[in-house]
Amino acid sequence: MCPLDTLIPVIELRATAPLLDAYLSYFETPSTPFTIPGHKQQAGRIDAGLGQVVDVDAPLYGGLDEVKLTRQLLRHAEQIAAECWGADWARFSTGGSTHANQAVIFALGRPGDRIAVSRTAHRSVLSALVLAGLEPIWMTPDIDEPTGVPMGISPAEFERALEHDPIALLLTEPGYLGTLSDLPPLIARAHAAGIPVIIDTAWGAHFGFHAQIPQHAMQLGADALVTSIHKSLPGYSASAMLLARTELLSIDRLEHGFETTHTTSPPGAPLASIDGCRALLQSRGEDLIGTLLANVTAFRQRVQSQFDVPVFLEASDFPAGRFDPTKLVLRVNQLGASGVEIERALLEHSIRIEMADHDTIIFMATITDTAADFDLLASALIPILKAVQGDARPSDTALSWSVVPQVAISMRDAYFANTEMVCRADAVGRISADLIAPYPPGVAVVAPGEVLTDEIVEGLTTSKDAGVRIAYASDPTLASYRVVRNER
Ligand SMILES: Cc1ncc(COP(=O)(O)O)c(C=O)c1O
């Protein structure tokens, strides 16, 4: 939670959020811009539809602040955020956690250095490693046997990675299904080895603002925290934040990493929304998250009461503090049904869900959902589940969590190698040039430089046939694969 002296009373949010105030003021104060963006908030004069899309856009430069940034509002808002999360440094990104991951990875070491990385990392981490020329030392998560869910990285797995002299530890917490590693011993061990800990907590921007949800990474002693404001908070799409403390990380490197990889024309709305969400968490976070927890619990109980087998992941399934209790994960395998079919049935009720594969559905619940929204979901969902219910299947571990990569050549070498397309049968045993991932969660089943095994090729086809979107493969039909050409 924010330190008590930074708690602010409930007042109109913009009074405590300088960028949010600047965004709103921009539209309240008429001006005649001879600057970019070219729409000048007047495209509606030319076309009403285009105007609806762009005329609500104000840039940072010459919008929220003057073109020369004379008011330094972004810096001010970032400083407030750093204090709120107990960090030394903060930057607001309009490029998502994708960009924040790139920025922090650019601030580590030199090309050729190695980083201990959880295999549950999002594809943005892998791309950033290729860009920065760093090599991953993969760490595979422990799997919780009863649920098939990845439980994060064990101290023993990190110890194994430490033997390869990593310059940093990069973890993804919480994982996509809401579980977390036991972070304090991992952070303590990394610090004992003199290396910084970076936590990609894209799904945990709300952490640390209520006693019943996990603490955030800065509270736990991490050196850098990456988070998406648009995922678990009411932020604008692609708004994100990078926070750091500077005992083991250099502010100069962080600044360079951030600016090297960010747009030079940041839109104002995502920045204003990050500032607004920070102010919201500071003033009303505990209340709002408390209500969310109550709504989610009531929803789970209502649905669960209809079935004899456990149908949701529950905090009680895991050790204390190792699961985000706001995460709604339906274990479709327990009902012997297909998550993808249930998703289709829900779409007929105009209900979109975050993720569905054969065995699992994730409903994204945030502080903006009301009790009525959960009622509506339960009323649509329960009859669908009753209609499709069959015999329970064992809890399989999804391909994204179960593959142990066989690295043949460096990811960067494979990325820039000469490549060729080969048919599926011939792909087995070859070195992949593509990163291929079911999306969501965007976790690589195979990365450039890794061997395409039978398990991977079969598993990807099975997932695709079950209705899962397989992303980033050069041939999305999976009839052929892009592999590193054998140079003689
Ligand atoms: C763990 C993780 N990190 C980073 C990202 C990228 O986030 P963004 O969409 O904000 O760029 C995602 C996206 O799903 C993610 O799951």
Image: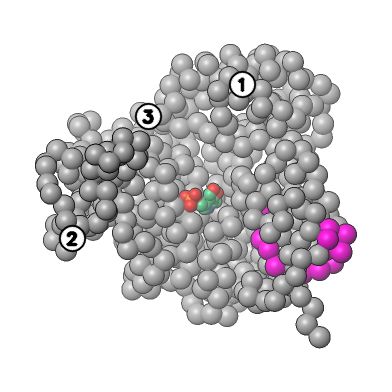
Circle 3: residue type: Leu
Mark 1: which amino acid? Glu
**Residue toward you, 272 or 57:** 57
Q: Which residue lies at the image location 41% right of the left edge and 29% below the top edge?
A: 368
How far apart are the two marked residues, 1 and 3, measured between alpha carbons?
Answer: 30 Å
Cβ of mark 3 under 8 A from ligand 1: no
Q: Taking the image as drawn, is residue 122 in sight? A: yes
Can residue 407 be spotted in the picture?
no
- Image: magenta residue range: 423-437
Which mark, by number, is residue 348? 1
Count of numbered labels shown in the rendering: 3
For the point 60% across and 67% down, which residue is it? 116
First of labels 3, 2 by sequence position: 2
Q: Secondary structure at mark 1?
A: loop
Q: Are marks 3 and 2 in contact (CB under 8 Å)?
A: no
> Is 408 left or right of 200, judged from the image as shown?
right
Give neighbour class at mark 1: few <14, some 14-19, many 20+ (Cα, 10 Å).
few
Per the rendering, the mark at residue 67 is 2
Q: Position of residue 353 (x, y in %)?
A: 58, 31
Residue 222 appears in which quarter of the rendering?
bottom left
Picture coordinates of residue 338, whole percent (x, y)? 75, 30
Residue 256 horizontal/vertical position (percent): 36, 72
**Residue at image location 57% in from the left, 80% down from the top:** 112
Is the stretch drawn in magenta largely helix, strand or loop?
loop
Where does residue 343 sit, x and y in percent of width and height?
65, 28
Q: Nearer the viewer, residue 463 or 51?
A: 51
